[in-house]
Amino acid sequence: MASALTDKLTRLVKEMRGQARITETNVQDMLREVRMALLEADVALPVVRDFINRVKEKALGQEVMGSLSPGQALVSIVSRELAATMGEGVSDINLAAQPPAVILMAGLQGAGKTTTTAKLAKYLIEKRKKKVLTVSGDVYRPAAIEQLKTVTAQAGAEWFPSSPDQKPVDIALAALDYARRHFFDVLLVDTAGRLAIDAALMAEITQLHAVLKPVETLFVVDAMQGQDAINTAKAFKEALPLTGIILTKTDGDSRGGAALSVRQITGAPIKFSGTSEKLDGLEVFDAERHAGRILGMGDILSLVEQVTAGVDMAAAQKLAAKMKSGDGFDLNDFLSQIQQMKNMGGLSSLLDKLPAQMAAKAGQVDMDKAEKDIKRKEGIIQSMTPLERRKPELIKATRKRRIASGSGVHVQEVNRLLNEFEQMQGMMKKLKGGGMMKMMKRMGG
Ligand code: GDP
C-alpha cells in the first residue's frame, strides 16, 4: 500500500509542478488519493473524513514557499497533519503518583494484554529502575492467571496470586495493599477480556478503575484489528478515562491504519507499540515516524539523522556564516559542498530513505554515474591553485588546460564545472545565509 500511495502522490506532485498555489482543483485530486490510501490502510471511514477536511482547510489558498512545488507543499501538510493527529513526539508512561503507581490494562481478549503487562514490567524494571508487582483480575480464565505468572517471572517482576473464586475488585485491593506494604513502585493490573464488547465486562473494569484510581489506564489494542478497532476503542473510551494506548502486533502485516483510528477516537496518546511475541518486543511509540510510514513517505527522520551525521557541521556553519557576511562563495566552498555530499554516505544509500517525491526525482538519475561525477569534480578543483579557487574569474584558457591535464579530464569538463559553480554561486546569493543548512532543513521537511 505504501508504494502505491507513493507512486500516486509522486505523479500528482509532478502534475502540480509549475503551479504557484494550492487550488481547489489540485487539492481535490491530491486528497482523493490520500483518502483512498488511508482507507486501504484500514483507517476507519469517519476518521478519514475528518482528517481530509482538516487538511483541506489548512491547504487551501496557501502560498507555496520557496523551492517547494504545490504538490510537495501539500504532501508536507498531509504528513504534518498526520503526525499531529497521531500525537506529536513520544509520550512516556506516567508514574507521577504516590507509590505504588497503579497501571490498569484494558482491552479485548487476545489483544495482547497479558503479554504487554509483562513487557511493560520489564521495561519499567530495566529502563526506569522500578520495583514492579503484577496481578491478574481475570477470574474467568485460570489459564490467564497462570500465563501472567509465567511471563511476570520472565520479566523479572513479582507476581501477586489470584484465583477464580475471588472477585476482581477484592483481588485488586489485596494486591494494592501488598504493594504498599512491600514498597513497590508500580502495580500493573491485568484484566479480563472478552471476545467482544459486553456490558458486564465494561461494568467490571469501570468498578476496578474506581477502586484502584490508576495513574495510567492503558487501552491495549491489536493493530491487525483494522476497521473494527474503532468500535472497540469507542466502547472502552466511554467506559474508562483512558490515558494511553498500546498498539500490539505491529510486526504483523497490519496496514497501520488502526493507530490513526484509535488515536483519533480516544484522543489518548499511543505510548508503546508491540513488535514481537517476546518480552523485549515493546517500543516507545514514535508518532511522527508512524505517520510517515502510513503515507509511505520514506523514513524521513532517519534520513535527516544520516544527513546531519555525515555532514561536517563546523564546515557547514562556516560556510553559512560566510554567506551571511556577504563574502563571496568561491571554489573552496563549492569543493566543501561536494565533499559533504559524499560524506552523507553515498547518494544511492540515501535514495531509499527519501520521501516519495524526492526519490522519484532522484530515481531518474544514474547513481553510479553521479558518484563518479562528484569524484571527478573534486579532482578538478584539487588541481587548482589556492588563488584560482578563491578567484575563479582568473581561470582562462591556459589555466584551464593545465587544470584539465592535472586532473586527467577534457577542458570541456573544466568548463562545465565552472558553469555549475557559477550557477551555484548565483543560487547561494539568493539563499544568502542559509546555504547547505537551509537546503538540508528543506529536505527534512
Ligand atoms: P490477552 O488475551 O489480551 O491477554 O492476550 P495475550 O497476551 O495472551 O496475547 C495474545 C497473543 O498475541 C499471544 O499469542 C501473544 O504472544 C501475541 N502477542 C501479543 N503481543 C504481540 C506483539 O506485539 N507481536 C506479536 N507478534 N504477537 C503478540
Image: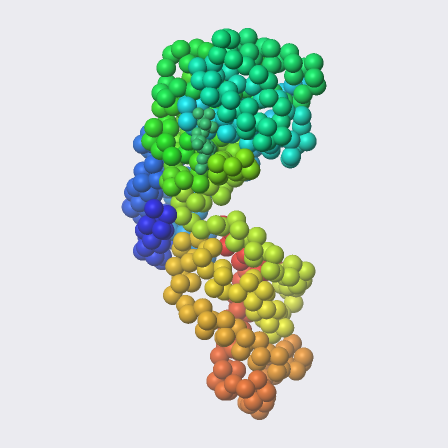
**Is 193 on the left or on the right of 279, as rendered?**
left
Picture coordinates of residue 286 (x, y %)?
A: 52, 39
Q: Which one is nearer the viewer's eye here, 47 or 109?
A: 109
Q: How is the image coloured?
A: rainbow
Residue 15 visible at all: yes
Q: Which one is nearer the viewer's eye here, 366 or 165?
A: 165
Kindly identify the residue that appears in the image at 47 percent across and 17 percent down.
Answer: 142
Picture coordinates of residue 103 (x, y %)?
A: 57, 21
Where is 47 relative to 377, above or below?
A: above
Quarter holding ligand 1: top left
Residue 19 visible at all: no
Q: Which one is nearer the viewer's eye here, 18 or 318?
A: 318
Picture coordinates of residue 317 (x, y %)?
A: 65, 59
Number of on-image labels: 0
Kindly identify the residue that appears in the image at 60 percent across and 10 percent down.
Answer: 174
The image quarter in which residue 291 lies: top left
Kindly identify the residue that appears in the image at 65 percent across and 76 percent down.
Answer: 390
Kindly identify the residue that appears in the image at 45 percent across and 57 percent down.
Answer: 352
**Is 182 on the left or on the right of 235, as rendered?**
right
Picture coordinates of residue 243 (x, y %)?
A: 52, 23
